[in-house]
Image (tube, rainbow, N blue to C red):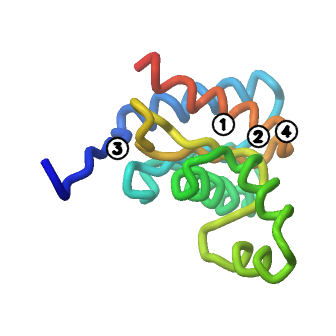
């Protein structure tokens, strides 16, 4: 139908399953983290955090999830793009609420359409990225 676009959105049950598996994997690594997920509108659908993870990681995880959703790309790729831009453009992108240029976020894609985003913070950006990628890959197993 003209004028209508197909959309997907991750469910609360799927978010809970994915966040739990990512949280458990981080625990196995000895890394206390926050895991956040957005739905297909960019709204927070889930947040899970380890009691030993620094509290600032709570918002960072949410921002990573939102950035991955909104840009439809891994936040490591977004970070590289932002830092490759001229300084005035970079400042505009870094000042947008909810956007962050840090590794550790991945979009949740279904049939090439974004259905949400996942963000992980607390393990270090490389490990956060690995955990977010793992979480995003789980949508195909649900």
CB contact under 8 Å: marks 4 and 1:
no
According to the picture, the residue beneath numbered tag 3 turns out to be 9
Q: Residue furthest front?
A: 2
Q: Residue 128: give its label.
A: 2
Mark 3 Cα shell of 10 Å, populated few (<14), some (14-19), many (≥20): some
Q: CA distance from mark 2 to mark 4?
A: 5 Å
Cα–Cα gap, marks 3 and 1: 18 Å
Mark pair 1, 2: CA separation: 6 Å
On the rendered structure, is 116 left or right of 52? left
**Tag 2 secondary structure:** helix
Secondary structure at badge 1 equals helix
In the image, which disc is placed on residue 126?
4
Which mark is first along the chain, 1 or 4?
Answer: 4
Question: Label 1, on which residue?
Answer: 132
Task: Tell me what residue is drawn at x 41 percent, y 40 percent.
Answer: 113
How packed mark 4 is, by other alpha carbons closer than 10 Å (few <14, some 14-19, many 20 or more), is few
Q: Nearer the viewer, residue 16 or 5?
A: 5
Cα–Cα span, label 3 and label 4: 27 Å
Q: Is residue 90 above or below residue 53?
A: below
Kind of element beneath mark 4: helix
Q: CB under 8 Å between callouts 1 and 2?
A: yes
Residue 49 seen in the current view: no
Q: State which mark lies toward you, 3 or 2.
A: 3
Q: What secondary structure is found at the residue carrying circle 3?
A: loop
Q: Nearer the viewer, residue 8 or 53?
A: 8
First in sequence: mark 3 or mark 4?
Answer: 3
Residue at horizontal 26 percent and vertical 50 percent from the top: 5
In this view, 131 is above or below 45: above
Whether pointer 2 and pointer 4 mark residues with C-beta atoms closer than 8 Å, the reply is yes
Q: Earlier in the sequence, mark 3 or mark 2?
A: 3
């Amino acid at each position: 139908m003209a004028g209508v676009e197909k959309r997907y959105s991750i469910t609360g049950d799927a978010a809970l399953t994915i966040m739990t598996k990512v949280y458990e994997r981080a625990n196995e690594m000895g890394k206390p983290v926050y895991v956040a997920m957005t739905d297909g509108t960019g709204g927070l659908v889930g947040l899970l955090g380890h009691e030993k993870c620094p509290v600032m990681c709570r918002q960072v995880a949410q921002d990573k999830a939102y950035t991955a959703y909104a840009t439809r790309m891994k936040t490591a790729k977004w970070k590289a793009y932002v830092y490759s831009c001229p300084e005035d453009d970079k400042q505009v992108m870094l000042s947008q609420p909810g956007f962050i240029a840090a590794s550790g976020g991945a979009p949740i894609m279904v049939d090439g359409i974004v259905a949400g985003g996942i963000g992980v913070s607390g393990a270090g950006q490389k490990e956060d990225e690995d955990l977010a990628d793992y979480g995003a890959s789980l949508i195909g197993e649900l």
